[in-house]
Image (spheres, helix red, strand yellow):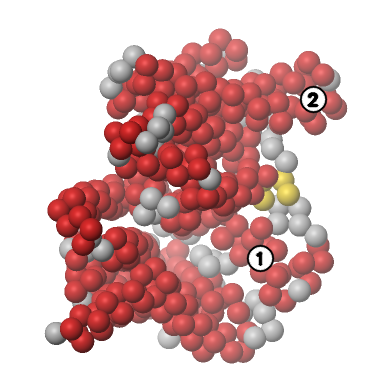
């Protein structure tokens, strides 16, 4: 059994309120452009230029927030500056997206090449202007007195309420940009599924010819989609330079715009799913920072976000194959096509992919423990052998979770044919993940003495509920119906 010190080092720190708060912070600059990528993708004009747009907006926000102090004085400038930087950064994000729209929709330039050109413009243009303003090609730190977006303080009395105290620690003192990102998930969902324009946008992405035949202005919708995409990417860039950091740095987005391109597919093409997918990337980034505090080689921690990117590309490819297959079946079967069945398959396939990605963290932790056992000893007197056999146990469990979810990733049709096996793999994985999360959460409440049994029972119930809600209930009902027919 794990000693409490080792458990605290490996799991306690990972599932603590402070760690969850850090996940929210690093998820924000991924979530915002991911929502922008989702909107443009559903309109059939994926915004490849997200990376460049984020850089342009991030740099613009820093410049205008810094110069606001010279224009209106120190006191007024500190009040007006952050919001001026936000407005001007958003404006530049919108103009950059409109530039891409003009190239592609008006001049009929290739969308991919136009997006790459925008990315080059963002990377090179910001450095060129930064050099002219500061004489530095690296960053603006020490040259421009950049301001930061305000942070939201929750009422202190929430910290005195047993259950709410945990969420208070997670959400208190978060940047206003993080709150905007969370609200945007709801707003984008409402826009896409509850407004006529959102419905038209999805119709244009599905079949632009059919949409045009019923009077929908395809070009106008795509201009709108790219504009919203640029606005959201701009928000992500502003958070990087005025919330995540307080200065602009050369190529500071570090590929987050490219990650955002794959996140919507990882999230099943839905705003809420995109939010969860962004959280997975945020988890990898935060974990790399957390593990970096241990006495282990820095190369192991620095590779985590890139491992997540590679996995996202794999999942993106698998989801693309599934989408193509569904469209072929829809065209072939016509009225006999069971859309609900394939929607359930797609959602559950994403779930299995999520579970395998999270299990990979266990492999990485196990490798880290084997490579540098001193970093995981904590204050206890562990031998290297104690840490190593525990590493092997963590790695074995993680590998088992990957293997039981892998068949439903490689051939998603298995989810429909073997729904009960899918349920077993998903619920077992969720039981372990959520059980640990609920257990560590309950340790912060008055129920700490019952945290282990209550945590894992709650994890089991929640795991089964998630599988059923994502489509498992429909698959079980369909299997029973087919069995009765046979």
- Where does residue 190 sit, x and y in percent of width and height? 54, 50
Query: Mark 2 and mark 1: span between their CA atoms?
Result: 33 Å
10 Å crowding of disc 2: few (<14), some (14-19), many (20+): many
Check the image and name the residue furthest to the front. 214
Among the 4 quarters of the image, the one containing residue 49: top left
- Where does residue 175 sit, x and y in percent of width and height? 66, 46
The tag earlier along the polypeptide, 2 or 1, is: 2
Which quadrant is the N terminus positioned in? bottom left
Among the 4 quarters of the image, the one containing residue 209: top left
**Residue 352 falls left or right of residue 191:** left
Residue at left offset 59%, top offset 75% = 441
Which quadrant is the C terminus positioned in? bottom left
In the rendered image, is residue 446 in sight?
A: yes
Residue at left offset 68%, top offset 63% = 169
Among the 4 quarters of the image, the one containing residue 200: top left
Q: Nearer the viewer, residue 361 or 280?
A: 280
- Where does residue 485 sit, x and y in percent of width and height? 18, 83
Q: Nearer the viewer, residue 83 or 214?
A: 214
Q: Is residue 249 above or below residue 3?
A: above
The label number, if any, that marks residue 167 in the structure image? 1
**Residue 74 falls left or right of residue 384:** right
10 Å crowding of disc 1: few (<14), some (14-19), many (20+): some
Q: Nearer the viewer, residue 90 or 140?
A: 90
Secondary element under disc 2, as helix, strand or loop, is helix
Residue at left offset 35%, top offset 21% = 104
Residue for badge 2:
77
């Amino acid at each position: 059994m794990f000693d409490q010190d080792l458990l605290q080092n490996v799991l306690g720190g990972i599932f603590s309120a402070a760690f969850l708060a850090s996940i929210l912070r690093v998820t924000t600059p991924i979530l915002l452009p991911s929502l922008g990528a989702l909107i443009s993708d559903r309109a059939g004009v994926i915004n490849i230029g997200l990376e460049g747009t984020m850089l342009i907006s991030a740099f613009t926000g820093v410049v205008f927030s810094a110069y606001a102090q010279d224009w209106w004085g120190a006191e007024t400038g500190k009040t007006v500056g952050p919001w001026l930087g936000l407005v001007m950064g958003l404006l530049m994000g919108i103009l950059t997206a409109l530039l891409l729209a003009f190239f592609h929709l008006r001049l009929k330039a290739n969308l991919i090449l136009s997006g790459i050109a925008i990315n080059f413009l963002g990377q090179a243009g910001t450095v060129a202007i930064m050099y002219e303003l500061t004489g530095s090609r690296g960053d603006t730190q020490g040259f421009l007195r950049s301001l930061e977006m305000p942070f939201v303080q929750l009422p202190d009395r929430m910290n005195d309420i047993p259950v709410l105290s945990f969420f208070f620690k997670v959400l208190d003192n978060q940047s206003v940009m993080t709150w905007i990102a969370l609200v945007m998930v709801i707003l984008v969902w409402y826009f896409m599924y509850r407004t006529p324009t959102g419905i038209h946008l999805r119709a244009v992405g599905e079949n632009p010819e059919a949409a045009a035949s019923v009077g929908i202005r395809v070009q106008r919708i795509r201009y709108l989609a790219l504009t919203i995409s640029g606005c959201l990417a701009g928000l992500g860039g502003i958070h990087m330079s005025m919330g995540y950091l307080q200065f602009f740095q050369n190529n500071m987005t570090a590929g987050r715009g490219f990650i955002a391109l794959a996140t919507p597919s990882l999230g099943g093409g839905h705003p809420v799913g995109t939010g969860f997918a962004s959280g997975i990337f945020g988890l990898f980034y935060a974990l790399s920072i957390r593990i970096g505090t241990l006495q282990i080689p820095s190369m192991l921690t620095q590779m985590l976000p890139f491992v997540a990117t590679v996995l996202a590309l794999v999942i993106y490819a698998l989801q693309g194959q599934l989408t193509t297959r569904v469209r072929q079946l829809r065209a072939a079967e016509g009225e006999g096509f069971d859309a609900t069945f394939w929607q359930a398959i797609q959602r559950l396939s994403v779930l299995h992919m999520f579970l395998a990605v999270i299990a990979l963290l266990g492999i990485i932790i196990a490798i880290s423990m084997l490579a540098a056992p001193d970093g995981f000893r904590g204050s206890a007197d562990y031998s290297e052998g104690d840490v190593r056999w525990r590493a092997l146990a963590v790695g074995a469990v993680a590998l088992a979770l990957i293997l039981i979810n892998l068949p439903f990733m490689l051939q998603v049709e298995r989810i429909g044919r073997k729904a009960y096996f899918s349920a077993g793999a998903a619920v077992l994985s969720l039981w372990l993940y959520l059980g640990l999360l609920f257990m560590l959460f309950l340790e912060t409440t008055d129920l700490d003495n019952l945290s282990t049994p209550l945590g894992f029972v709650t994890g089991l119930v929640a795991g089964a509920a998630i599988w059923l809600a994502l489509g498992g209930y429909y698959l079980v009902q369909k299997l029973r119906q087919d069995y009765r027919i046979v």
